[in-house]
Structures are given as structure tokens and as C-alpha cells.
């Protein structure tokens, strides 16, 4: 599909819908139910991203075993999804944990839908030392990095200088819908709003773990954007930029979300009270 075709619907670049391979969907029926819920929310393309330890990329036999297991489960669930939802584009990448200082991200199978983008996360939701240098070194491998759920990490300073440094190194930033709805606590919600206020988030994603008791949180996030009069930002973050990222293009700048004068500040003050 072309980038323009992808933009017709919402593209979700972060979820865990391959049954039985991580802490996401446990069965094919779980995954099918999760996909239906996402389609109901205008998602037309899913690039699901099973967890993968960066340590495995330095142990070739272990990596091949892991990827073979995911391949088998993905093939099975993909066939079931195609049969029930032929209108959906269902693709795969991985969410690679940067749990070693020098993972090898050169393997095409680690990337989002055969693009040049790797979705990465910092271990334990904590920020290791020297992360800008890590990002710079990894991108020498010919990949573009998309940092998962950027609002959830602990260890930022008040001005989010480290996030700005990641952007300066060329990393793209993905935030979760659920953070705007309090899914990860007040601190994550405030951090996400502050990043949106600066126009630093490149795309939104569900990080949906595909189980019946979990929520997708897209409607709640959409209401926040409506309250902030940020329809264009919503379009860029959910349709345009995810399509461009997986299609090999740079994400477009997202206008800082301000809404009515002082509205975002009032929202932040409310969350801090």
C-alpha cells in the first residue's frame, strides 16, 4: 500500500496481538476480538510488535529460535484475521528492548513491516545513562528508531531535556493513547501533555495487549484532542505520521497543542492538583 492509501484510516504501530508469544493476546480468539475492537475505532492498518530482548540479537541461535516461534504464531493468527477481516492490513515488527549496550538491529525481521524503522524501548521503564549516544550509535546501522511509549519512562528532568536530545539524534517518539486517560498514572499523563504542548510526539499508538479485560483507550484520547481543539494534530498523529513512518518517509511536524488560550495549562494544573 502507498502512504496515501494508508492515511485513509488509522495506522497503529504498537500492539501485542500475536497469541502466546509475550504478555499480549493469549489465543487466536483474543486477537480476533482485539482486532474487531480496533477496526470499530477506525484502525485500518495494524503493525503488531511482539516483545524481543535486544540481548538475543547478539546470540544468533537464540534469536533464530525466538523469531521462528513468532513466525509460526503470526502466520496462524494472520490467516484467521484475513478470513474474518479481509479489509484490514495486518503486519508485524517487534518492540525491541534495549537491554544491552550494543544490540544488532540489522536483521530486517526486527523492523516495522519491512521498513527501516525499529520500535525500541528502554528496560524497566527507566532511562539508562548516555541514551543519546546509544541512539546515535544504533542509527549507524542504517535504521530509524521509534521510541515506544515515551511518556512512561521515569527519570526525566522538569524541562524534558533528554527527550529533546533524543529528537536531536533523529529518534522518533511514540506515545500511548491510554496515557491521556490516566492508564499509567498522573505523572505519565502530565509528561505526555507537556510533550504534546511542545509538538514533540510523532505518532500515537494503542500498545494494546489484546485481552478482553483491557481497553483500547482511543475514544478517551480522541475526546481530549477535541477538548483542546486539536483535530489537525490528531490526524497527523494517528493517520498521517504512522503511515509515513512505516512507508519510509519522515513524519510531518505536529503543531504544538494549545487549544484555547491557557487551556492546556489549566489541564496540567488540574492533573497536578
Image (cartoon, rainbow, N blue to C red):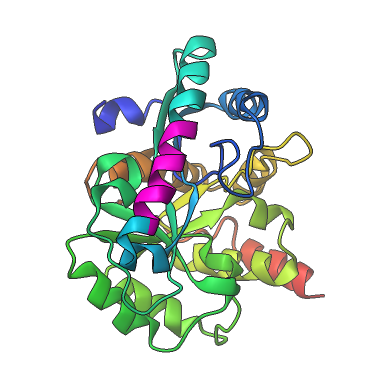
Q: In screen coordinates, is 137 left or right of 218?
A: left
Q: Position of residue 273 (x, y in %)?
A: 82, 75
Question: Can the viewer see residue 169?
Answer: no
What range of the chain is rendered magenta?
62-73
- Residue at 57%, 48% (x, y): give it: 207
Of the pair 135 and 75, the residue shown nearer to us: 75
Decide whether residue 68 is among the magenta residues. Answer: yes
Q: Position of residue 177 (x, y in %)?
A: 60, 49
- Residue at 39%, 41% (x, y): give it: 68
Q: Quadrant of the N terminus?
A: top left
The image quarter containing residue 37 is top right
Of the pair 206 and 164, the residue shown nearer to us: 206
Total count of labels: 0
Q: Position of residue 31 (x, y in %)?
A: 61, 29
Decide whether residue 248 is among the magenta residues. Answer: no
Q: Position of residue 109 (x, y in %)?
A: 30, 46
Amino acid at each position: 500500500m502507498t502512504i496515501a492509501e494508508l492515511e485513509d484510516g488509522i495506522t497503529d504501530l504498537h500492539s501485542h496481538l500475536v497469541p502466546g508469544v509475550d504478555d499480549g493476546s493469549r489465543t487466536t480468539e483474543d486477537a480476533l476480538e482485539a482486532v474487531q475492537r480496533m477496526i470499530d475505532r477506525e484502525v485500518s492498518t495494524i503493525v503488531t510488535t511482539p516483545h524481543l530482548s535486544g540481548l538475543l540479537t547478539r546470540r544468533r541461535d537464540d534469536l533464530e529460535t525466538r523469531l521462528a516461534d513468532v513466525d509460526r504464531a503470526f502466520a496462524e493468527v494472520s490467516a484467521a484475521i484475513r478470513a474474518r477481516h479481509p479489509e484490514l492490513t495486518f503486519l508485524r515488527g517487534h518492540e525491541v528492548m534495549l537491554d544491552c549496550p550494543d544490540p544488532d538491529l540489522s536483521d530486517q525481521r526486527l523492523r516495522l513491516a519491512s521498513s527501516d524503522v525499529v520500535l525500541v524501548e528502554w528496560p524497566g521503564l527507566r532511562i539508562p545513562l548516555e541514551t543519546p549516544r546509544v541512539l546515535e550509535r544504533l542509527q549507524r546501522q542504517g535504521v530509524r528508531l521509534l521510541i515506544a511509549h515515551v511518556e512512561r519512562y521515569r527519570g526525566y528532568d522538569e524541562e524534558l531535556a533528554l527527550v529533546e536530545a533524543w529528537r536531536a539524534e533523529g529518534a522518533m517518539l511514540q506515545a500511548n493513547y491510554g496515557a491521556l486517560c490516566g492508564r499509567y498514572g498522573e505523572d505519565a499523563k502530565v509528561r505526555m501533555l507537556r510533550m504534546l504542548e511542545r509538538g514533540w510526539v510523532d505518532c500515537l499508538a494503542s500498545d494494546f495487549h489484546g485481552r478482553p479485560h483491557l481497553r483500547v483507550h482511543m475514544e478517551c484520547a480522541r475526546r481530549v484532542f477535541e477538548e483542546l481543539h486539536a483535530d489537525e494534530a490528531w490526524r497527523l498523529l494517528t493517520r498521517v505520521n504512522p503511515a509515513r513512518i512505516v512507508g519510509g518517509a519522515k513524519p510531518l511536524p505536529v503543531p504544538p497543542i494549545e487549544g484555547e488560550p491557557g487551556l492546556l495549562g489549566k489541564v496540567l494544573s488540574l492533573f497536578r492538583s
